[in-house]
Image (tube, helix red, strand yellow):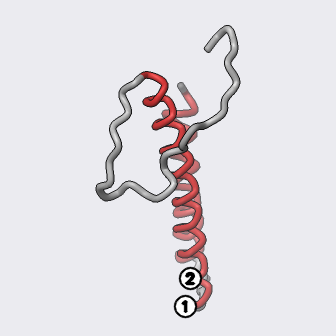
Amino acid sequence: IFWNLAGVPFSYCYSTLYLLHRSHMNDPIHHSKMYTSFMFMILLAAYYVWDTANSQKNRFRMQQRGTFVERNTFPQLPWGTIRNPTYIKTKHG
């Protein structure tokens, strides 16, 4: 619990604090527009993978419980639902 309350916000803001410190030293970081565009595309791709993986996980759980409802509205991304998944059944679930 401590990490969720203290560590996670710290790790999210640490990069911003680094950039703020660099700007106060009059040594700001400059990137080209091509580099910034490339990094933005990497961010979008990583978000897509993360969101699709979590969507598959949650929809699989809903299918197991019988509460799944197919939706085609925004922000549902393609490949968010796995059809006929194979999984391992154990004595704990």
**Residue shown at the point (51%, 54%) measured from the top left:** 79
SS under mark 1: helix
> Looking at the picture, does residue 15 appear above or below residue 58?
below
> Looking at the picture, does residue 24 appear above or below residue 77?
below
Q: Name the residue under label 2.
A: 36
Q: Quadrant of residue 66?
A: top left
Q: In which quarter of the image is residue 77?
A: bottom left
Q: Residues within 10 Å of mark 1 (few under 14, many from 20)?
A: few
**Residue shown at the point (32%, 48%) measured from the top left:** 71
Q: Are marks 2 and 1 in contact (CB under 8 Å)?
A: yes
The amino acid sitting under disc 2 is Thr
Instruction: Give the number of marks.
Output: 2
Give the image location of residue 58, x and y in percent: 47, 36
- Judge by depth and name the residue closer to the eye, 83 or 10: 83
Q: Residues within 10 Å of mark 2 (few under 14, many from 20)?
A: few
The quadrant of the image that shows the C terminus is top right
**Residue shown at the point (43%, 22%) measured from the top left:** 65
The amino acid sitting under disc 1 is Lys
**Residue shown at the point (35%, 57%) measured from the top left:** 75
Give the image location of residue 60, x and y in percent: 51, 34
In 3D space, how far apart are the residues under numbered discs 2 and 1 (Cα atoms)? Answer: 5 Å
- Judge by depth and name the residue closer to the eye, 49 or 82: 82
Give the image location of residue 91, x and y in percent: 68, 8
> Looking at the picture, does residue 45 appear above or below residue 32?
above
SS under mark 2: helix
Seen as rendered, the residue at the extreme top is: 91
Q: Residue 33 carries which label?
A: 1
> Looking at the picture, does residue 5 appear above or below residue 83?
above
